[in-house]
Image (tube, grey):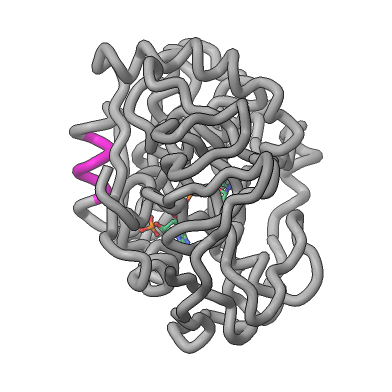
Amino acid sequence: NKQIVLAKRPVGWPDESCFRLEQCPEPACGPQDVVVEAVWLSLDPYLRGRMNEGPSYAPGFALDRPMVSRVVGRVLESQNARFRKGDWVWGFLPWALRCLTPRGEGLTLIDPSLGKPSLAISALGMPGLTAWVGAIELGNPAPGDTVFISSAAGAVGQLAGQFAKRAGARVVGSVGSDDKVAYVLERCGFDAAFNYKTRSVDEALAELCPKGIDVYFDNVGGSTLEAALRHANIMARFPVCGMISAYNETEDRGIRGLQALLSKRIQMTGFIIYDHIHKLPAYQARVAPWFRDGEMHFHEDIVQGLEQAPTALIGMMKGEAIGKRLVQVAAE
Ligand code: NDP
């Protein structure tokens, strides 16, 4: 068996030396236990916060212990009546080929009728519900509203835009490459998009949001948030999902222009998806048919091999993935 552990805490951007691939014992299944073979690991921006000492919104990883994220896998062996060999499950599991889950705690069975198993940690899991809560429940877009989404080609962004479109909004995205511009326009049905690395965000918003911004779905914070504040309409909603531009910074650069919250009566609401997790079954039941029937599009960017997970995580934060980045550890 093999696993990837946190070898060193990063300062600023992590590199591969922060991780170590090592041999580990084969799990031994005791009474009530379940052994899971990992098939897909989810790579998420919040994992960067967990590599720091002390808690962010989830506790920090221990040094020399395995990295943990949402994992979809297959039951290899079970002494627990709730799980049978061959069942698809997901849970917060170590980055290892095989692992023991004592008493099967924390494992959730995946309903195969909802779609392919990896969707449990992508479109039908946490990133999907995050997009729904932010774009629809907090953004509350009315038909004709302009919704601006940053990191629009990412796991959350691609769905947030499509949910807002279904609600009748005009959807504009910012992304970090021309391929991503093409992706959100051609595959996700955005009305407009721009590459923030080659264009001034202010100029792009002036051109592409001529009636101003009614909802800004913030995935990145920083100067993009500052520009959105300048282009916001009175009574705009700003669901704050993430601020990835700051995750690898060593100093807090602050946000300028917050007076706009007052003068424009903007409702800026931070949210963490754990507080909404009870909504997951209803969300899955509502949206699974949209993916099954091809009404909505979702791209998974899959990297092969457990040993590639560290490089794939760093690459995801640097913007190299389109859609939801997963690592495939074993054949489906
Ligand atoms: P993404 O798939 O969007 O991947 C991260 C992307 O961030 C990269 O592809 C890159 O895209 C973009 N990015 C990186 N650095 C910068 C920068 N300096 N400025 C602008 N964009 C940058 O990740 P997710 O969809 O999983 O997550 C999106 C956001 O949502 C993150 O901030 C994450 O922390 C947050 N989140 C919050 C949750 C909550 O409960 N509140 C739950 C899930 C996610 P590009 O090429 O466009 O630059």
Residue at x 50% of width, y 12% of height: 285
Residue at x 69% of width, y 74% of height: 52
The image quadrant of residue 296 is top left
x, y percent for residue 292: 29, 16
Numbered circles on residues, count = 0
The image quadrant of residue 91 is top right
From the viewer's perspective, is residue 113 above or below residue 227? above
**Residue 232 seen from this side:** yes
Position of 308 with respect to 7 (left or right) is left
x, y percent for residue 93: 57, 53
Q: Is residue 324 magenta?
A: no
Q: Is residue 181 magenta?
A: yes
x, y percent for residue 79: 59, 38
**Residue 225 seen from this side:** no
Position of 11 with respect to 324 (left or right) is right
From the viewer's perspective, is residue 73 above or below residue 264? below
Quadrant, the N terminus: bottom left
Quadrant, the C terminus: top left
